[in-house]
Image (cartoon, rainbow, N blue to C red):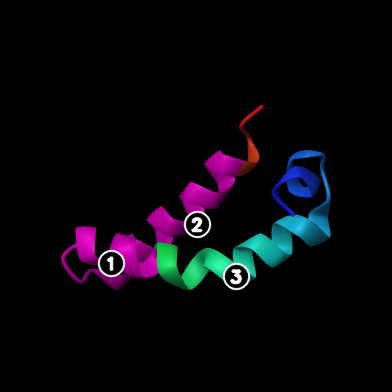
């Protein structure tokens, strides 16, 4: 699935997001000391950054 996402598959990216967003969000929430808005923004930016990797 990761290779498909790297190859540009939107459905693969969507699936990766669905599978992993909650865990990434919880990690960001812990780092953000419970600030939910900051955690959500950080988690979303993490996925955007991953999508832009070569």
Which part of the image, by quadrant, shows the C terminus? Answer: top right
Observer-side mark, 2 or 3, equals 3
Which quarter of the picture shows residue 43? Answer: bottom left
Query: Which numbered disc, 3 or 1, marks the residue that appears first in the sequence?
Result: 3
Q: Nearer the viewer, residue 39 or 30?
A: 30
Direction from residue 37 to residue 49 in the image, left or right: right
Which residue is tagged 2? Answer: 44
**Tag count in the figure?**
3
Specify the segment rendered in magenta: 25-50
Q: Disc 3 vs disc 1: Cβ atoms closer than 8 Å? A: no
* Residue 11 screen position, x and y as percent: 81, 61
Query: Which numbered disc, 2 or 1, marks the residue that appears first in the sequence?
Result: 1
Q: Disc 2 vs disc 3: Cβ atoms closer than 8 Å? A: no
What is the number of the mark on residue 19?
3
Q: CA distance from mark 3 to mark 1?
A: 17 Å
* Residue 7 screen position, x and y as percent: 82, 39
Direction from residue 5 to residue 39 in the image, left or right: left
Q: CA distance from mark 2 to mark 1?
A: 12 Å
Q: Residue at x 23, y 69 (%)?
A: 35
* Residue 32 screen position, x and y as percent: 22, 60
Q: CA distance from mark 2 to mark 3?
A: 13 Å
Q: Nearer the viewer, residue 43 or 9?
A: 9
In the rendered image, residue 13 lying in the magenta stretch gets the answer: no
Observer-side mark, 3 or 1, equals 3
Direction from residue 53 to residue 43 in the image, left or right: left
Which residue is tagged 1? Answer: 29
Q: Residue at x 22, y 65 (%)?
A: 30
Query: Which numbered disc, 2 or 3, marks the residue that appears first in the sequence?
Result: 3
């Amino acid at each position: 699935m990761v290779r498909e996402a790297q190859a540009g598959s939107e459905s693969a990216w969507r699936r990766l997001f669905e599978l992993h967003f909650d865990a990434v969000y919880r990690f960001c929430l812990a780092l953000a000391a419970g600030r939910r808005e900051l955690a959500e923004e950080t988690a979303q930016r993490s996925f955007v950054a991953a999508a832009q990797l070569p």
